[in-house]
Image (spheres, rainbow, N blue to C red):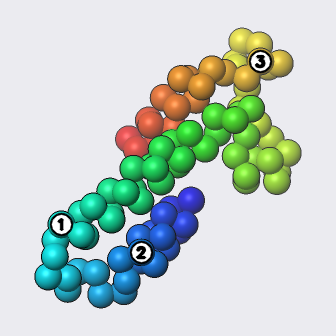
Amino acid sequence: MTFLIVSLVVIFLGSNFMEEDNPGKFIITLFSILIPGMFLYFSKDSIKGNSIGKWAMGIMIRDERNPDIVPSYSKLLLRNLLLII
């Protein structure tokens, strides 16, 4: 996911994006890619408790008390936000 986000930034900004004379274009393009990218990254396990890697390995996130239930979207989002720490 990180590779995809960085690749999109380089594709849209070009390889010499740090040498731009227009910092406004840089900031707008960067945030227009990073905000949706970070949202996708932090909600990667939020669809049925699966990400692409978990799906390929046949594993999924389940509630600790009841293994038949997928945790709520907010719990999964909070779980992924805490990955920063």
At 36% from the left and 86% from the top, the residue drawn is 15
Which mark is in front, 1 or 3? 1
Please give the residue where the numbered disc 1 appears in the rendered image: 24
Tell me whether the residue at label 2 lies in contact with that at label 1, contact meaning CB atoms closer than 8 angstroms: no
Residue 12 image label: 2
Q: Nearer the viewer, residue 54 or 9?
A: 9
Q: Amino acid at mark 2?
A: Phe
Where residue 49 sits in the image (x, y, percent)?
71, 33
Cα separation, mark 2 vs mark 1, equals 14 Å
Where residue 44 sits in the image (x, y, percent)?
61, 44
**Which mark sits nearer the N-terminus, 1 or 3?**
1
Say which quadrant the N terminus sits in: bottom right
At 44% from the left and 35% from the top, the residue drawn is 82
Of helix, strand and loop, which one carries label 3?
A: loop
Which mark is in front, 2 or 3? 2
Please give the residue where the numbered disc 3 appears in the rendered image: 69
Q: Amino acid at mark 3?
A: Ile
Q: Is residue 1 above or below residue 69?
A: below
At 25% from the left and 70% from the top, the residue drawn is 26
Near mark 2 (Cα within 10 A), the count class, few <14, some 14-19 or many ≥20, is: few
Say which quadrant the C terminus sits in: top left
**Which mark sits nearer the N-terminus, 2 or 3?**
2
